[in-house]
Every structure is written in structure tokens, then in C-alpha cells.
Image (cartoon, helix red, strand yellow):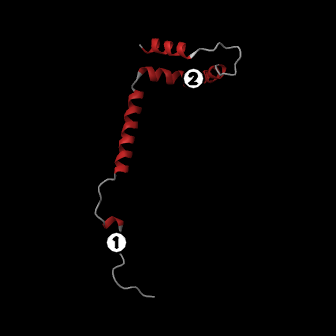
Amino acid sequence: MHITGNVASTAGNPQARAPSAPSAESAGIKNDVDAARNTALSALNNDRFRAMLEQISDPRASGELMAMGAGNKNSVATDLNTALSRYAENSE
């Protein structure tokens, strides 16, 4: 079989097509990526976040976190209002 004519027409060549405007979906994805990047940079520059990250990355912390689990019958449970109050005090 022999084919004649221009086989590399613009219809079959995506690079020859005119660029289209970004779709709403791709614009939304770009906005989400930009927001995630800004959030990550903000977290990296936040001293409280950095200190917390250092604490939870400490190998000794995993054992302490396991001891805080709900299955530990020797621990004293903290009610939600007390936890929220302590969190508010530490956030000031």
C-alpha cells in the first residue's frame, strides 16, 4: 500500500496547533499548587512549627507518643475543654 500526500498535517501534529487558553481546571490546579507552596514556605519560616517538627522528629518522641495512646490505662485522660484551654494558653 502506498500513501501519497502530506502525512504530517497540522491535524495530526499537536505542536502545530495554536496554543489554547488554560482551562478552568488547570487554572484551579495552578492556584492550588501556589497555595500549597506558600503554605509550606510559611510553615518552614515559622519558629513554633520548626520547634514542633524538631520535637516530633526526635526518635524518643515515638515511644512517648505511643505511651499517650488511649489504650494506656495508667494515663489520666484530659477532657476536650481542658485541652482547648491549654492550647489557647500556649498559642498566646
Instruction: Tell me the SS state at disc 1.
Output: loop
Residue sitting at x 38%, y 29%: 42
Q: Are marks 2 and 1 in contact (CB under 8 Å)?
A: no
Q: Which of disc 1 and disc 2 is earlier in sequence?
A: 1
Residue at the bottom extreme, as displayed = 1
Q: Which mark is residue 58?
A: 2
Q: Quadrant of the C terminus?
A: top left
* Disc 2 from disc 1: Cα separation: 58 Å
Q: Quadrant of residue 13?
A: bottom left
Q: Is residue 90 above or below residue 14?
A: above
User: Which amino acid type corresponds to the residue marked 2 in the rendered image?
Assistant: Asp
Q: Which residue is mark 1?
A: 11
Q: Is residue 50 above or below residue 5?
A: above
Residue at the right extreme, as displayed = 73
Q: Which mark is residue 30?
A: none
Residue sitting at x 47%, y 20%: 51
Residue sitting at x 33%, y 65%: 15
Of labels 2 and 1, the one closer to you: 1
The picture places residue 91, in percent across and down from the top left corner, at 44, 15
User: Which amino acid type corresponds to the residue marked 1 in the rendered image?
Assistant: Ala
The residue lying toward the viewer, choosing from 66 and 69, is 69
Q: Is residue 3 above or below residue 17?
A: below
Q: Is residue 11 above or below residue 51?
A: below
- Judge left or right: residue 17 versus residue 68: left
The picture places residue 39, in percent across and down from the top left corner, at 39, 32
